[in-house]
């Protein structure tokens, strides 16, 4: 199916056509990629008014990562859940309004990224969206505005860290130029909900210095944020140094109990059966989706599972062992 068919059908509430896209995605290969990318894009277009940590974009990218464990035979249960978590969500309607108006009236005087950053720091939301549109058009519709907004959002890493990571990964999945502006609007939508603190100074602490303390603490929301920002830290981005500056500050101010303990299981399958670990993660994800709980709660559990999966695959045997213990405690006991 053409990439736009699902998006048009979803916006019109045409569930039958959406389900046909799902069935097409089950064949794997390009049709699976197409379906997943449409889910990711639609999640980014949700008009979200709640906490960023529960944003459908986070759930959808986590779901995509789980499905990716077996791309030849993708899980229908997980693919269907992707449609379920979007079913009742309202979409933003005015993303293109300011962009179209700016295009008609012309970019005008030069606008710099600094102007956009200042407007957001000062909570001048309408002005910020106009500056974002002008900067976007002046950059030949490049992704530069996405990176700048992600940088700003990380000034409140505790609130926005997981959202920034998963939204960036959602866009990176296919990086379609025609989708960039909608991802820009998604970031603006989250940033304008809460006043940003001023930029912070860089600290010396890094994620690999603190993962033991993170996993000793039984705080699943902390695991999710930490797993997200650690992946940002080791990623590639033109603004990586700025990302690391804000992440290091967040790590430095965490008030955690470093004296706790965690029962480790050296015989856990995650420490042994590497070839089958992907299918085991899929099975755990499916068991979460099948539970008789609201989709929001199942989405949260899925994100926690994906976060522990990512921590277990960091280049550290000790981190893998601790993540396996948390996985067993949370989902296998």
Image (tube, helix red, strand yellow):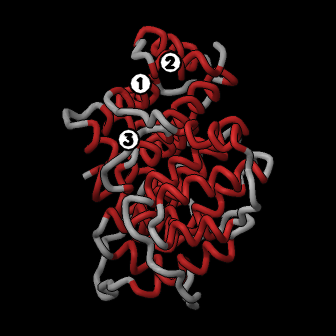
Residue corresponding to mark 2: 22
Instruction: Please identify the quadrant where the N terminus is shown.
Output: top right
Badge 1 vs badge 3, beta-carbon distance below 8 Å:
no
Q: Is residue 29 left or right of residue 249?
A: right
Look at 37% across and 59% down and name the residue there. 193
Which badge, 3 or 2, comes first in the chain's sequence? 2
Look at 65% across and 68% down and name the residue there. 234
Badge 2 vs badge 1, beta-carbon distance below 8 Å:
yes
Task: Tell me if mark 1 has few (under 14), some (14-19) or many (20+) residues whose alpha carbon lies within 10 angstroms of its own.
Answer: some
Task: Tell me if mark 2 has few (under 14), some (14-19) or many (20+) residues whose alpha carbon lies within 10 angstroms of its own.
Answer: many
Location of residue 14 with respect to 213 vertically, above or below: above
Q: Which mark is residue 80?
A: 1
Location of residue 140 with respect to 314 vertically, above or below: above
Provide residue 97's location: percent of width, then percent of height.
Answer: 55, 37
Provide residue 64's location: percent of width, then percent of height.
Answer: 53, 39
Provide residue 133's location: percent of width, then percent of height.
Answer: 64, 50
Q: CA distance from mark 3 to mark 2?
A: 21 Å
Provide residue 327's location: percent of width, then percent of height.
Answer: 36, 57
Element type where label 1 sits in the image: helix
Location of residue 191 with respect to 301 vertically, above or below: below
**Quadrant of res 112:** bottom right
Residue corresponding to mark 3: 284
Q: CA distance from mark 1 to mark 3?
A: 16 Å
Location of residue 92 with respect to 250 vertically, above or below: above
Residue 247 appears in view: yes
Task: Tell me if mark 3 has few (under 14), some (14-19) or many (20+) residues whose alpha carbon lies within 10 angstroms of its own.
Answer: some
């Amino acid at each position: 199916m053409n990439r736009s068919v699902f998006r048009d059908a979803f916006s019109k509430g045409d569930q039958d056509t959406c389900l046909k896209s799902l069935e097409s995605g089950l064949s794997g290969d390009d049709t699976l990629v197409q379906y997943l990318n449409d889910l990711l894009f639609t999640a980014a277009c949700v008009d979200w008014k709640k906490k960023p940590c529960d944003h459908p974009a986070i759930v959808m990218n986590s779901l995509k990562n789980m499905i990716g464990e077996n791309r030849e035979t993708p899980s229908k249960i997980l693919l269907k859940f992707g449609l379920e978590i979007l079913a009742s969500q309202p979409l933003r309607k005015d993303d293109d309004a300011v962009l179209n108006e700016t295009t008609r009236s012309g970019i005008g005087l030069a606008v710099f990224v600094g102007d956009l950053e200042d407007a957001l720091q000062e909570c001048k939301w309408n002005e910020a969206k106009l500056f974002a549109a002008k900067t976007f058009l002046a950059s030949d519709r490049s992704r530069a505005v996405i990176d700048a907004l992600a940088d700003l959002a990380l000034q409140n890493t505790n609130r926005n860290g997981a959202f920034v990571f998963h939204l960036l990964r959602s866009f990176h999945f296919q990086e379609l130029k025609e989708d960039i502006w909608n991802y820009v609007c998604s970031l603006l939508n989250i940033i304008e909900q809460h006043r940003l603190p001023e930029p912070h100074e860089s600290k010396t602490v890094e994620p690999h210095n603190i993962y033991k303390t993170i996993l000793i603490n039984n705080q699943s929301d902390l695991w999710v944020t930490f797993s997200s920002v650690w992946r940002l830290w080791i990623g590639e981005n033109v603004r990586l140094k700025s990302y690391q500056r804000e992440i290091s500050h967040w790590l430095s101010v965490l008030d955690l109990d470093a004296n706790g303990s965690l029962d480790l299981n050296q015989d856990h399958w995650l420490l042994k059966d590497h070839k089958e670990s992907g299918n085991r993660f899929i099975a755990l994800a499916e068991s979460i989706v099948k539970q008789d709980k609201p989709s929001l709660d199942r989405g949260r559990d899925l994100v926690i599972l994906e976060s522990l999966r990512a921590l277990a695959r960091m280049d550290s045997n000790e981190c893998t062992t601790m993540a396996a213990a948390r996985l067993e405690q949370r989902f296998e006991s």
